[in-house]
Amino acid sequence: MAAKKKVTGLKVKLVKSVIGSKKDQIATVEALGLHKVGDVRVQPDNAQTRGKINKVCHLVKIIEE
């Protein structure tokens, strides 16, 4: 039986389009590795990532599993 891998970071999902957002917010979303609505990426759980998420909290969602 295969063992489940434990997620060692934060799953971040883009839930709102960046159209109409400020340039620095668009750059932050791209820095998180998100391009299209619905994209999900796993980011390391550190202060830098938390700051990026805080800056664009109205555009992204943290997925808990």
Image (cartoon, rainbow, N blue to C red):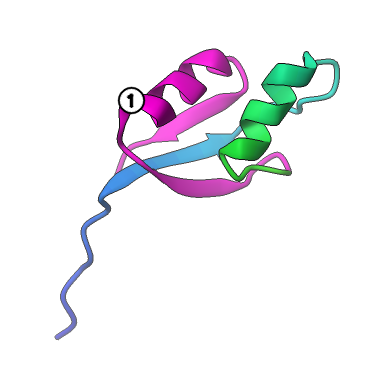
36 versus 52 height, above or below: below
Place of residue 52 in the rendered image (x, y in percent of width and height, measured from the top left): 50, 24
At x 78% / y 13%, what residue is drawn? Answer: 22
Q: Is residue 40 left or right of residue 16?
A: left
**Foreground pick, 37 / 29:** 29
**Foreground pick, 4 / 50:** 50
Place of residue 18 in the rendered image (x, y in percent of width and height, measured from the top left): 76, 25
Residue type at mark 1: give it.
Answer: Ala
40 versus 64 height, above or below: below
Which quadrant of the view contains residue 27?
top right
- The answer to whether residue 48 is magenta is yes
Q: Work out which residue is located at the far bottom of the displayed protein and give it.
A: 1
Residue bounds of the magenta highlight: 36-65
58 versus 50 height, above or below: above
Quadrant containing the N terminus in the rendered view? bottom left
At x 48% / y 38%, what residue is drawn? Answer: 12
At x 31% / y 45%, what residue is drawn? Answer: 9
